[in-house]
Image (cartoon, rainbow, N blue to C red):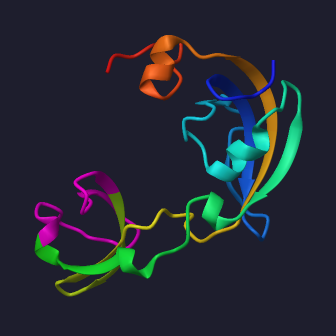
Amino acid sequence: MSIAADKVVSIEYTLTDDDGEVLDTSVGDEPLVYLHGAENIVEGLEKALDGKQPGDEIEVVVEPEEGYGDYLVELVSTVDRAAFDGVDELEVGMEFEAEAPDGESQIVVVRAVDGDEVTIDANHPLAGQRLHFKVKVIDIRDASEDELAHGHPHGDDDHEH
């Protein structure tokens, strides 16, 4: 069986940056399981995996436009400290869930704290970066109807929506 849309794929991967620093890996842990064609992983990696089979190993470089997008300065803003009501200590690097302009939930990171002014960044932490993936295909199977309807794979501990 080959990787194609509507297949549940298990991969072992290591993600590094341009300097070779490991940013994330599944090696030594459970493989990453995703639904191919459902935008569960970055576009560039998904394209590179299309047609691969269990046992195949690939190395692929994903440019920002097919990864986490370009870094957008318009996603960096300064808000009043009062927006963090109930948070005693604000520190650079802290992450918070906030409501995006479209009403969806998004993660923002505190980039600076200057008195009552807090600079937050809604860019993905890997936005603007070239991604280097080393991947081994572990397993491929057909997705169930529930998985297709929900847009992601379900594990052994199946969940309710």
| Front in this rendered view, residue 18 or 75 | 75
Name which residue lies at 70% across and 27% down: 10
Q: Using the rendered image of the protein, determine whether residue 157 is visible from the camera's viewpoint.
A: no
Identified at 54% across, 12% down, the residue is: 144
Q: Where is residue 104 shown, x and y percent of the image?
A: 27, 51
From the viewer's perspective, tell me whether residue 22 is left or right of residue 161. right
Residue 57 in which image quadrant: top right
At x 82%, y 35%, the residue is 136
* Residue 13, x across and y down, in percent: 74, 41
Q: Quadrant of the N terminus?
A: top right
Region rendered in magenta: 83-106
- Indicate whether residue 102 is drawn in magenta: yes
**In the depicted structure, whether residue 13 falls above or below residue 124:** above
Q: Tell me which secondary structure the magenta stretch mostly adopts.
A: loop
Residue 80 x/y as whole percent? 15, 79
| Quadrant position of residue 19 | bottom right
